[in-house]
Image: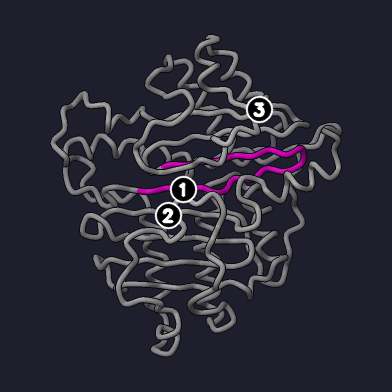
Amino acid sequence: MKFILSFGYVLLLSLNFCTSSPKTIESSTGQTLSKQEVVVAAKAFLESLSELEKKSCLLSFDDQERENWHFVPIKRRGLALQLMSDKQRELVASLLKTCLTPEGYRKVEDIRQLESILTLLEKRAPNNNYRNPNLYFVSVFGEPADSSVWGWRFEGHHLSLNYTYASESLTVTPQFMGANPAEIPIGDSKGKRVLAEEEDQARALVQSFSDAQLATALIAKRAYPEIITGNDRRVSLQNYEGLPYNQLTEAQQMTLVDLIQLYLNNNTNRVAQTHWKVIQEAGVEQLYFAWAGGIEKGEKHYYRIHGPRLLIEFDNTQNGGNHVHSVCRDPSNDFGEDALRRHYETHQH
């Protein structure tokens, strides 16, 4: 379900997990639910674990691993899906569904299944572990509770979903999704593109630019080989580049907002609305759209949407331009940095 964005209207909804009675949040199906659903789902998963499994999965909230995120196929701290029972994997799916829209969850599952396609393309053994769709790790940081600080992460190749809870707020950045291959070249799913809209909507925007607009938006003739910020724990990209929001036509501004919405709407409606409100309060006019590389389909390219409270990076350059990396970040609040600061200012620890 998509939320309505208005240029002159600041959304007044805010995410609230406070301990007073019956607050609600928006579910992945659009229904209103108890504020406790995420906590309940996380606790149900933890309670299904043996002591040994819990030792691998449950880490201190202050553990440096909480911000040690990545999107390449490496071993993580946490418990891998492949080591879980079917019931435990179902509980992980339930936890994911409390944090994602159905479309967001679909992307997560499709990205995992691309590992099986890579097994075929790379001519690996069918039972290889390097491209195992279940080589994705769950880590929980701190004890899940309504009024405490805690977090959890779902991470593996081309996925890094980071959730930080601080009493009354939820932070969902950095949020990384990738796709290799970007377009499946073989089998029954030939032609399928997991992150098609993220690419096509941005291309439609850049192709709508006048020559003068394109000259400003194009920051490099050759696409960058990777997203600029990589897996930095904090956004190090300070300078805004490209075409500012106020140099877009009204139709182009709407297209840009729709593109931003596409990323935000991987998360529940309430979370997406809250993040958009933060972007509006920082000033939509502060946003910049930048492009590098070719603007025709099939050409290697990179784009960026950057403002005080939003950074989206997307590149499709590897494997001949058939390998996507995308990330959505909040330069001021990744891993709940701002929310945690407010929490510690008002709560004794």
The disc placed on residue 326 is: 2
- Picture quadrant of residue 42: top right
- Picture quadrant of residue 24: top right
Q: Position of residue 172 (x, y in %)?
A: 59, 45
- Amino acid type, mark 1: Phe
Residue that carries the numbered disc 1 in the rendered image: 176
Q: Position of residue 336 (x, y in %)?
A: 66, 46
Tell me if mark 3 has few (under 14), some (14-19) or many (20+) residues whose alpha carbon lies within 10 angstroms of its own.
some
The residue mark sitting in front, 1 or 3, is 3
Magenta stretch: give its range: 159-178
Pick whichever, 56 or 243, lies toward us: 56
Tell me if 241 is positioned left or right of 118 in this view.
Answer: right
Could you tell me if the residues under marks 2 and 1 are in contact, i.e. CB atoms within 8 Å? yes
The residue mark sitting in front, 2 or 3, is 3
Is residue 168 among what the camera can see?
Answer: yes
Mark-to-mark CA distance, 2 and 1: 6 Å
